[in-house]
Image (spheres, rainbow, N blue to C red):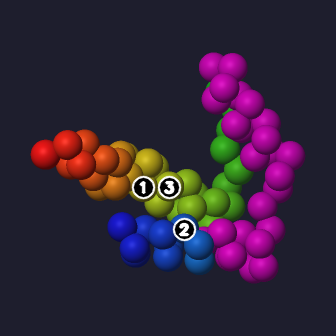
Amino acid sequence: MLMLLIGIGLSGLGMTYIDHTDIVSMKTFMLGLMYFDLQPMPSNPFLIVHLSLVVPLMIIFPFSKLIHAPGLFF
């Protein structure tokens, strides 16, 4: 999980300092997902890596960290 966080951070820094992401097209893509009106995703390689690392983190996180809370009762 630490490697996912480092990869997400590095790809975010890459989007900021190396290859700038078009925010308007990203907003159009995300709003299209929200309204079920699919729009083309921006073809920035750092953005694709960033989003493909965020998805496994969203899947792993509830099972790795939030499961500790019920352990208080055992």
Question: In whole angstroms, how far apart are the C-alphas of marks 3 and 1?
Answer: 5 Å
Residue shown at the point (64%, 60%) measured from the top left: 47
Residue shown at the point (27%, 52%) measured from the top left: 68
Q: Which corner quadrant holds the N terminus?
A: bottom left
Question: In whole angstroms, how far apart are the C-alphas of marks 2 and 1?
Answer: 9 Å
Task: Compare residues 6 and 26 and report the one nearer the observer.
Answer: 6
Task: Compare residues 43 and 21 and report the one nearer the observer.
Answer: 21
Residue shown at the point (25%, 43%) measured from the top left: 70
Residue shown at the point (34%, 55%) measured from the top left: 65
Q: Considering the numbered disc 2 on the image, is that residue within a helix, a strand or a loop?
A: helix
Tags 2 and 1 in contact by the CB under 8 Å rule? yes
Q: Which residue is at the far left?
A: 74
* Percent position of residue 39, x then y: 70, 32
* Percent position of residue 2, x then y: 40, 73
Residue that mark 1 sits on: 57
Q: Amino acid at mark 1?
A: Leu
Residue that mark 3 sits on: 54
Pick whichever of labels 3 and 2 is earlier in the sequence: 2
Above or below residue 39? Residue 14 is below
Tags 3 and 2 in contact by the CB under 8 Å rule? yes
Q: Considering the numbered disc 1 on the image, is that residue within a helix, a strand or a loop?
A: helix
In which quadrant of the rendered view does residue 17 lie? bottom right
Report whether 3 appears left or right of 69: right
* Percent position of residue 32, x then y: 70, 28
* Percent position of residue 45, x then y: 62, 65
Residue that mark 2 sits on: 8
Q: Which residues are magenta?
A: 11-36
Report whether 71 appears left or right of 19: left
